[in-house]
Amino acid sequence: MNAAGADYVIVDRLSKVYNEGTRQRVEAVAPSSFTVKAGEFVALLGPSGCGKSTLLMMIAGLDAPSAGRIEVAGRAMTAPRAETGIMFQDPTLLPWKSALDNVLFPFLAAQRQAANPPVDRAAALLDEVGLRGFHDHKPRQLSGGMRQRVAICRALVYEPDLLLMDEPFSALDAITRDEMNLVLMKMWQDHRHTALFVTHSIREAVYLADRVLVMSRRPGRIVEDIRIPFARPRGLEIGETVEFNKICGHLRGKIEHVPH
Ligand SMILES: Nc1ncnc2c1ncn2[C@@H]1O[C@H](COP(=O)(O)OP(=O)(O)OP(=O)(O)O)[C@@H](O)[C@H]1O
Ligand SMILES: [Mg+2]
């Protein structure tokens, strides 16, 4: 668990230009600054192509910034860190491995740690996300939602202090997506890692997050930063309230009217 209240992620005038100096030059992220507090759940919302994945990949240390600075847990980010968990839209499971071995994959792949993988922790995580009885199943024997549950466990098996998620549920149907939001909320409340969640969905952002950041169209920059006031734990029924819909309407207006 992170110490509450301190800035855990600091993004300072971060920008990204792809293919600089060529005719394919793309300014993906305009200089952007924000912070995420320890234990906070922040959603990053913006139109397609505005640079959300680029921003997240820079914070993961998987893509180099063109300018600016990232600090995570008090240290300048220069390379990927083992303490950062990542989830993508595609669960990217290995088809020939069981659910349990897929969760353990980060350990099995890191040669030094392959001898002693945390089998009990991985099994407990699978139970926590509702996959008791499915540990030995292969991905093709699991539904789309179940595969993303395995991917959540794989992201959490290193006990990350920071969880970065890039539209992890956008390929799922609406009912499964609601279920996955509940699973994610429960896991976040139990483990209390700092979380940054990229989504196109205004409702998903408002349901999940303590704060929602809105990015403008490309080149993306942060044009709104609002606090979501609902107490936790949150049930899906908060989505029916006037206040919830008012916040969604406000964010929709920001996205529709953001300048280019
Ligand atoms: N490796 C790359 N090389 C060149 N351009 C890239 C590269 N990756 C992304 N881009 C460009 O940067 C811009 C932002 O892309 P990015 O994937 O970050 O957007 P996004 O907000 O995540 O979009 P979506 O919501 O559709 O996933 C796009 O114009 C994209 O074409
Ligand atoms: Mg993206």
Image (spheres, helix red, strand yellow):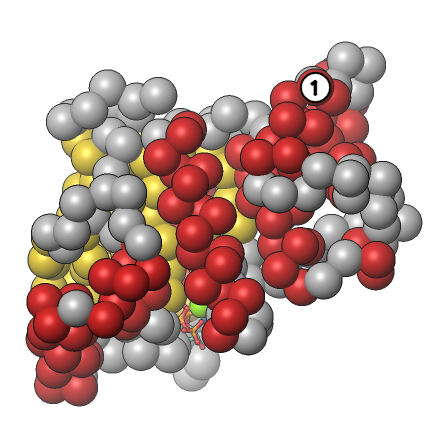
Q: How many marks?
A: 1
Q: Is residue 47 above or below residue 58?
A: below
Q: Nearer the viewer, residue 253 or 206?
A: 206
The residue at the point 64 percent across, 34 percent down is 127
Q: Nearer the viewer, residue 181 or 60?
A: 181
Farthest residue toward the right? 96
Q: Is residue 107 above or below residue 175?
A: above
Q: In which quarter of the view is residue 118 placed?
A: top right
Residue type at mark 1? Asp
Q: Is residue 220 above or below residue 233?
A: below
The residue at the point 10 percent across, 67 percent down is 243
- Residue 93 visible? The answer is yes
Find disc 1 in the rendering and name its residue.
120
Give the position of the C terminus as an image quadrant: bottom left
Assign a secondary structure to mark 1.
Answer: helix
The residue at the point 33 percent across, 60 percent down is 236
Q: Is mark 1 within 8 Å of ligand 2?
A: no
Residue 133 in the image, given as x and y percentages of width and height: 78, 39
Residue 88 in the image, given as x and y percentages of width and height: 54, 56
